[in-house]
Amino acid sequence: MAENVTPRVRVPRDATAGEVITIKTLISHPMESGQRKDGDGNVIPRSIINRFTCTFNGEVVIDVTLEPAISTNPYFEFEAVVPESGTFAFTWYDDDGDVYTDTKEIAVS
């Protein structure tokens, strides 16, 4: 299990109907590829965030599969159209079965 894993998300608080907004996410995670060795020559077990999803009011906005070559603390920036007020739900899936989530509300006028 990775320690001190912290997701951070930035979503505008409000928007107009149909507006394209920018969403930024970052998760603090060591992203160990499983190919490095420790000081004693033992392989450090693989531990990566292998999937990231974002939904808006239950509809998929983005669904990404990550591979071992991704850097530490994966950052995503993407755009979404907001037709109505609602909730963005963000989910990161770890190799060890841990799931990290965050949600953000947006008000549409």
Image: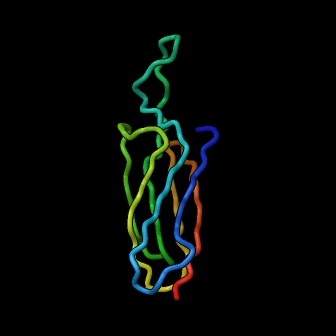
Location of residue 103 in the rendering, given as x and y in whole percent from the top left corner? 59, 66
Q: Which residue is found at the position 52% from the left and 12% from the top?
A: 39
Return the residue found at the far right: 4
Location of residue 76 in the rendering, given as x and y in whole percent from the top left corner? 42, 54
Position of residue 5 relative to residue 33, above or below, is: below
Q: Which residue is found at the position 44% from the left and 80% from the top?
A: 82
Q: How many marks?
A: 0
Q: Which residue is found at the position 46% from the left and 18% from the top?
A: 37
Which of the 4 image quadrants contains residue 102?
bottom right
Q: How is the image coloured?
A: rainbow
Location of residue 17 in the rendering, given as x and y in whole percent from the top left corner? 44, 87
Which of the 4 image quadrants contains residue 33?
top left
Which of the 4 image quadrants contains residue 28?
top right
Location of residue 24 in the rendering, given as x and y in whole percent from the top left corner? 47, 59
Return the residue found at the far top: 40
Q: Quadrant of the N terminus?
A: top right
Q: Which residue is found at the position 49% from the left and 86% from the top?
A: 84
Position of residue 20 relative to residue 27, above or below, is: below
Q: Nearer the viewer, residue 26 or 38?
A: 26
Position of residue 92 relative to residue 87, above or below, is: above
